[in-house]
Image (tube, rainbow, N blue to C red):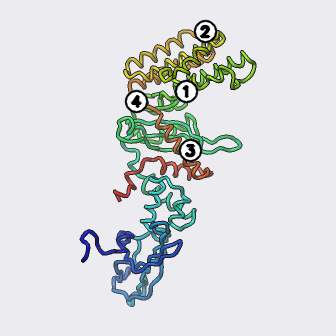
Amino acid sequence: MPCTAFGKPDLTTFCRLDELGLVAVGQRLELNRATIECRVAEADPWCRKCGAEGKARDTVIRRLAHEPFGHRPTVLMVRVRRYRCDHCRSTWRQDTTAAARPRAKISRTGLTWALQGVVLDHLTVTRVAAGLGVSWSAANAAVLAEGRQRLIDDSGRFDGVRVIGVDEHVWRHTRRGDKYVTVIIDLTPVRYKTGPSRLLDMIEGRSKAVFKRWLADQPRAWRDGIEVVAMDGFTGFKTAATEELPKATAVMDPFHVVRLAGDALDVCRRRVQQHLHGRRGRKNDPLYKARRTLHTGAGLLTDRQRDRLNVLFAVEDHVEVEATWGIYQRMIAAYREPDRKIGKMAMQAVIDSLASGVPPPLIELGKLGRTLKHRAADVLAFFDRPGTSNGPTEAINGRLEHLRGSALGFRNLTNYIARSLLEAGGFRPLVHPQTR
């Protein structure tokens, strides 16, 4: 008695050949490969030139790499019928463009599987090539071409962008120095809590001219729609945004502001260490032992850590470190304050105290105060626009670092930019299997 919950096995449907206009007629399973013999579902006997009905002449075999099923790469052995017209003496083949592009070696379903593997599952091109049973170069060229056509060159990719982040990124380390790119991130989904951030574009170099030129190349309507630009302390990005996006508000995100204070604390600690001992810190030196504890927020200190700091600051020679540490903690407390207005007032008080006159021995706080005074508007703008931070930009930079590690490095910048846009471009809705 047949089971009503199951239908008759159909290799054509199971392998999704009906989506390619093919019908399965046979299969051969080998240890490392599966081959499915197919034919074109629709006959094509009508002459392309005169429209007369032609006669079947013979068949040719077209082999296409298909999406794998199980651990075996799958190959489609498509029998394509050729016709001949007795009226105009022309010949033609059955149309297989539904299965693959002309002269392509990978089926359209195989390309979708490969693109989904790179974009969604973060597979390497080597793994994709092994799954398709093709060479690395063939898989890489196919994935980049498909990704550029369906995703990167999408005309609506920049639509709806209101908040952007900009940062620099090292894409290659060489003996002559690091090579940098400037990354532009769409922070709009994070700002309005509609999704994760995504990589908008990547351009070679890191300077005001590079970012300014990229902004100038964008449509005027798009630039006028940008509300906020999140960035680090690099003045070049700030100047470029001011000149090309006069209506946008520049925001210096908390990560980089606190990092400036943390760097000042480290430099002060090392300077005092050198002054007292004439050498770098060693494991038994109090300043060196407390280097990590000094960077811990006051509210997160354990009793043991608090006692260690009390002993450290009890030494009169460490007063400069204590003063710098106090400013560092005040800045952290301002950002952690739940009430934005109170937090903004606390940060304003820190900036005013550093700008009103710092004792000459506190060299690091003097330098920090000049920086904060110069960028005070950008630092305080964060408190008026909650959720605007360059933190997601740093997260995407981390994903790109992972991409470089998986690929064992890149030498071609064009290839790296394309792979980065596929990796972090936020194209999940376009290739998710539920929407195909």
Q: Which residue is mark 1?
A: 259
The first of marks 2 and 1 along the sequence is 1
Q: Which residue is mark 2?
A: 359
Element at label 1: helix
Give the left or right position of residue 175, taking residue 190 as reference: right
Which of discs 4 and 1 lies nearer the camera? The answer is 1
**Residue 349 vertical placement versus 397 (above, below):** above
Q: Which residue is mark 4?
A: 247
The first of marks 4 and 1 along the sequence is 4
The first of marks 3 and 4 along the sequence is 4
Identify the residue at the far right of this view. 278
Residue 97 appears at what percent x and percent y?
41, 71
Element at label 2: loop
Residue 431 appears at what percent x and percent y?
40, 56
Query: Pointer 3 and pointer 4: residues touching (CB < 8 Å)?
Result: no
Residue type, label 4: Lys
